[in-house]
Image (spheres, rainbow, N blue to C red):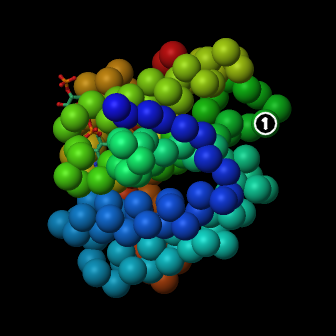
Amino acid sequence: MITIKKVGAAAVPEIIALANISWKPTYKDILSEPQMDYMMRLLYSADTLHQQITQQQHQFILAIDNEHNIGFASYFVIDPNNLTAYKLQKLYINPDQQGKGIGKKLIDFIIEDIKPKGAVSLELNVNRFNNANQFYKKIGFGIIREEDIDIGNNYFMNDYVMRKIL
Ligand SMILES: CC(C)(COP(=O)(O)OP(=O)(O)OC[C@H]1O[C@@H](n2cnc3c(N)ncnc32)[C@H](O)[C@@H]1OP(=O)(O)O)[C@@H](O)C(=O)NCCC(=O)NCCS
Protein backbone atom coordinates (compact mmCIF):
# COMPACT_ATOMS: atom_id res chain seq x y z
CA MET A 1 0.00 0.00 0.00
CA ILE A 2 1.23 3.48 -0.82
CA THR A 3 1.39 5.96 2.02
CA ILE A 4 2.31 9.61 1.95
CA LYS A 5 3.91 11.33 4.93
CA LYS A 6 5.27 14.74 5.83
CA VAL A 7 8.98 14.79 6.68
CA GLY A 8 11.40 17.29 8.18
CA ALA A 9 15.14 17.93 8.09
CA ALA A 10 15.96 14.41 9.32
CA ALA A 11 14.82 13.13 5.90
CA VAL A 12 17.35 15.18 3.90
CA PRO A 13 19.52 12.10 3.11
CA GLU A 14 16.40 10.25 1.87
CA ILE A 15 15.41 13.21 -0.33
CA ILE A 16 18.91 13.35 -1.83
CA ALA A 17 18.82 9.59 -2.46
CA LEU A 18 15.47 9.95 -4.27
CA ALA A 19 16.72 12.93 -6.32
CA ASN A 20 19.74 10.87 -7.37
CA ILE A 21 17.34 8.29 -8.83
CA SER A 22 14.79 10.55 -10.51
CA TRP A 23 16.23 14.00 -11.22
CA LYS A 24 18.80 13.35 -13.95
CA PRO A 25 16.63 10.96 -16.00
CA THR A 26 14.03 13.74 -16.13
CA TYR A 27 16.39 16.25 -17.75
CA LYS A 28 18.84 14.06 -19.68
CA ASP A 29 17.25 14.95 -23.07
CA ILE A 30 16.60 18.58 -22.14
CA LEU A 31 19.73 19.92 -20.43
CA SER A 32 23.47 19.46 -20.97
CA GLU A 33 25.43 17.22 -18.57
CA PRO A 34 27.34 20.19 -17.06
CA GLN A 35 24.09 22.11 -16.48
CA MET A 36 22.53 19.06 -14.81
CA ASP A 37 25.57 18.67 -12.52
CA TYR A 38 25.45 22.38 -11.69
CA MET A 39 21.72 22.29 -10.93
CA MET A 40 21.97 19.10 -8.84
CA ARG A 41 24.61 20.79 -6.66
CA LEU A 42 22.55 23.98 -6.48
CA LEU A 43 19.18 22.40 -5.74
CA TYR A 44 19.98 19.18 -3.87
CA SER A 45 22.93 19.89 -1.59
CA ALA A 46 22.23 18.95 2.03
CA ASP A 47 22.73 22.63 2.98
CA THR A 48 20.16 23.91 0.47
CA LEU A 49 17.57 21.34 1.53
CA HIS A 50 18.17 21.98 5.25
CA GLN A 51 17.76 25.70 4.68
CA GLN A 52 14.54 25.22 2.71
CA ILE A 53 13.07 23.07 5.47
CA THR A 54 14.24 24.90 8.58
CA GLN A 55 14.28 28.54 7.39
CA GLN A 56 11.99 28.81 4.38
CA GLN A 57 9.20 26.55 5.64
CA HIS A 58 9.21 24.24 2.63
CA GLN A 59 7.14 21.17 3.45
CA PHE A 60 8.55 17.94 2.02
CA ILE A 61 6.48 14.78 1.64
CA LEU A 62 7.50 11.24 0.71
CA ALA A 63 5.53 8.55 -1.10
CA ILE A 64 6.33 5.17 0.44
CA ASP A 65 5.46 1.70 -0.84
CA ASN A 66 6.13 -1.13 1.63
CA GLU A 67 8.86 0.86 3.39
CA HIS A 68 10.50 1.87 0.08
CA ASN A 69 10.61 5.55 -0.82
CA ILE A 70 9.27 5.94 -4.34
CA GLY A 71 8.76 9.68 -4.76
CA PHE A 72 8.81 13.05 -3.11
CA ALA A 73 7.39 16.54 -3.36
CA SER A 74 7.78 19.90 -1.64
CA TYR A 75 5.59 22.99 -1.37
CA PHE A 76 5.38 26.27 0.49
CA VAL A 77 3.24 29.35 0.92
CA ILE A 78 4.51 32.01 -1.50
CA ASP A 79 3.94 34.98 0.83
CA PRO A 80 3.54 34.15 4.56
CA ASN A 81 1.26 37.21 4.89
CA ASN A 82 -1.14 35.82 2.30
CA LEU A 83 -2.12 32.20 2.83
CA THR A 84 -4.10 31.92 -0.42
CA ALA A 85 -1.28 31.11 -2.86
CA TYR A 86 1.05 28.13 -2.55
CA LYS A 87 3.87 26.89 -4.75
CA LEU A 88 4.69 23.31 -5.64
CA GLN A 89 8.49 23.37 -5.66
CA LYS A 90 9.43 19.76 -6.40
CA LEU A 91 7.64 16.60 -7.60
CA TYR A 92 9.63 13.53 -8.60
CA ILE A 93 8.52 9.92 -8.83
CA ASN A 94 11.13 7.18 -9.28
CA PRO A 95 11.30 6.28 -13.01
CA ASP A 96 10.13 2.69 -12.46
CA GLN A 97 7.09 3.92 -10.50
CA GLN A 98 5.84 6.61 -12.89
CA GLY A 99 2.42 6.32 -14.51
CA LYS A 100 0.86 4.48 -11.54
CA GLY A 101 -1.08 7.38 -10.06
CA ILE A 102 1.52 8.35 -7.44
CA GLY A 103 2.16 11.87 -8.78
CA LYS A 104 -1.56 12.59 -8.66
CA LYS A 105 -1.75 11.14 -5.12
CA LEU A 106 1.01 13.51 -3.95
CA ILE A 107 -0.78 16.51 -5.49
CA ASP A 108 -4.08 15.45 -3.88
CA PHE A 109 -2.30 15.15 -0.50
CA ILE A 110 -0.86 18.67 -0.89
CA ILE A 111 -4.23 20.14 -1.83
CA GLU A 112 -5.90 18.46 1.16
CA ASP A 113 -3.20 19.93 3.40
CA ILE A 114 -3.27 23.52 2.11
CA LYS A 115 -6.96 24.08 1.36
CA PRO A 116 -8.04 24.16 5.01
CA LYS A 117 -5.24 26.69 5.62
CA GLY A 118 -6.86 29.07 3.12
CA ALA A 119 -5.16 28.15 -0.17
CA VAL A 120 -7.08 29.02 -3.32
CA SER A 121 -4.30 28.39 -5.83
CA LEU A 122 -1.28 26.15 -6.34
CA GLU A 123 1.45 27.32 -8.73
CA LEU A 124 4.51 25.61 -10.14
CA ASN A 125 7.34 26.04 -12.62
CA VAL A 126 7.97 23.29 -15.15
CA ASN A 127 10.59 23.22 -17.87
CA ARG A 128 8.92 24.03 -21.21
CA PHE A 129 10.49 20.90 -22.76
CA ASN A 130 9.48 18.56 -19.93
CA ASN A 131 6.39 16.57 -20.92
CA ALA A 132 5.37 16.65 -17.25
CA ASN A 133 3.46 19.78 -18.31
CA GLN A 134 0.97 17.35 -19.95
CA PHE A 135 0.52 15.64 -16.58
CA TYR A 136 -0.14 18.98 -14.93
CA LYS A 137 -2.66 19.94 -17.66
CA LYS A 138 -4.42 16.63 -17.15
CA ILE A 139 -4.90 17.28 -13.45
CA GLY A 140 -6.22 20.82 -13.87
CA PHE A 141 -3.23 23.18 -14.11
CA GLY A 142 -3.11 25.82 -16.83
CA ILE A 143 -0.16 27.79 -18.20
CA ILE A 144 -0.20 31.38 -16.93
CA ARG A 145 3.12 32.62 -18.38
CA GLU A 146 6.61 31.70 -19.52
CA GLU A 147 9.62 32.46 -17.35
CA ASP A 148 13.34 32.31 -18.22
CA ILE A 149 15.30 32.24 -14.98
CA ASP A 150 19.02 33.02 -14.83
CA ILE A 151 20.48 30.45 -12.43
CA GLY A 152 24.09 31.60 -12.78
CA ASN A 153 27.06 30.23 -14.73
CA ASN A 154 25.30 31.29 -17.96
CA TYR A 155 22.59 28.69 -17.35
CA PHE A 156 18.87 29.35 -17.62
CA MET A 157 15.72 27.52 -16.66
CA ASN A 158 13.17 27.92 -19.47
CA ASP A 159 9.91 27.36 -17.70
CA TYR A 160 6.16 27.57 -17.91
CA VAL A 161 4.50 28.88 -14.80
CA MET A 162 1.32 26.87 -14.29
CA ARG A 163 -1.50 27.34 -11.83
CA LYS A 164 -4.43 25.32 -10.56
CA ILE A 165 -7.35 27.04 -8.89
CA LEU A 166 -8.39 24.91 -5.91
C1 LIG B 1 5.37 14.01 -13.95
C2 LIG B 1 5.15 13.02 -12.81
C3 LIG B 1 5.32 13.70 -11.46
C4 LIG B 1 3.72 12.45 -12.91
O1 LIG B 1 3.53 11.50 -11.89
P1 LIG B 1 3.05 10.03 -12.26
O2 LIG B 1 2.87 9.27 -11.01
O3 LIG B 1 3.96 9.46 -13.29
O4 LIG B 1 1.64 10.36 -12.95
P2 LIG B 1 0.20 9.73 -12.60
O5 LIG B 1 0.28 8.25 -12.81
O6 LIG B 1 -0.25 10.21 -11.27
O7 LIG B 1 -0.67 10.38 -13.77
C5 LIG B 1 -1.92 11.02 -13.57
C6 LIG B 1 -2.53 11.24 -14.95
O8 LIG B 1 -1.66 12.06 -15.73
C7 LIG B 1 -1.28 11.35 -16.94
N1 LIG B 1 0.15 11.61 -17.21
C8 LIG B 1 1.20 11.36 -16.38
N2 LIG B 1 2.34 11.75 -16.96
C9 LIG B 1 2.01 12.21 -18.18
C10 LIG B 1 2.75 12.75 -19.26
N3 LIG B 1 4.09 12.88 -19.19
N4 LIG B 1 2.08 13.13 -20.38
C11 LIG B 1 0.73 13.01 -20.45
N5 LIG B 1 -0.04 12.52 -19.45
C12 LIG B 1 0.60 12.13 -18.33
C13 LIG B 1 -1.49 9.88 -16.62
O9 LIG B 1 -1.72 9.14 -17.80
C14 LIG B 1 -2.70 9.93 -15.72
O10 LIG B 1 -3.87 10.05 -16.49
P3 LIG B 1 -5.19 9.16 -16.14
O11 LIG B 1 -5.65 9.69 -14.80
O12 LIG B 1 -6.11 9.44 -17.26
O13 LIG B 1 -4.72 7.75 -16.05
C15 LIG B 1 6.15 11.82 -12.90
O14 LIG B 1 5.98 11.15 -14.13
C16 LIG B 1 7.60 12.22 -12.75
O15 LIG B 1 8.14 12.18 -11.64
N6 LIG B 1 8.25 12.61 -13.87
C17 LIG B 1 9.66 12.96 -13.83
C18 LIG B 1 9.92 14.15 -12.94
C19 LIG B 1 9.22 15.42 -13.39
O16 LIG B 1 9.20 15.77 -14.55
N7 LIG B 1 8.68 16.14 -12.40
C20 LIG B 1 8.05 17.41 -12.60
C21 LIG B 1 9.07 18.47 -12.43
S1 LIG B 1 8.28 20.07 -12.52
The amino acid sitting under disc 1 is Pro
Residue 139 can be seen in this image: yes
| Residue 150 higher or lower than 106, as above or below | below
Assess disc 1: are there few (<14), some (14-19) or many (≥20) residues with their C-alpha within 10 Å of its C-alpha: few
Q: As drawn, is 42 to the left or to the right of 128?
A: right
SS for dot 1: loop
Residue at 34% in and 31% down: 1
Residue 27 can be seen in this image: no
Residue 165 percent coordinates (x, y): 49, 18
Residues 53 and 148: in front is 53
Residue 41 percent coordinates (x, y): 50, 77
Residue assigned mark 1: 80
Residues 110 and 128: in front is 110
Residue at 27% in and 31% down: 101
Q: As drawn, is 117 to the left or to the right of 127?
A: right
> Which quadrant of the view contains residue 80?
top right
Residues 106 and 144: in front is 106
Residue 87 percent coordinates (x, y): 57, 38
| Residue 85 higher or lower than 149, as above or below | above
Residue at 54% in and 38% down: 5
Mark 1 within 8 Å of ligand 1, using the beta carbon: no
Q: As drawn, is 135 to the left or to the right of 112?
A: left
> Which quadrant of the view contains residue 148?
bottom left
User: Among all residues in the image, which is located at the extreme right?
Assistant: 81
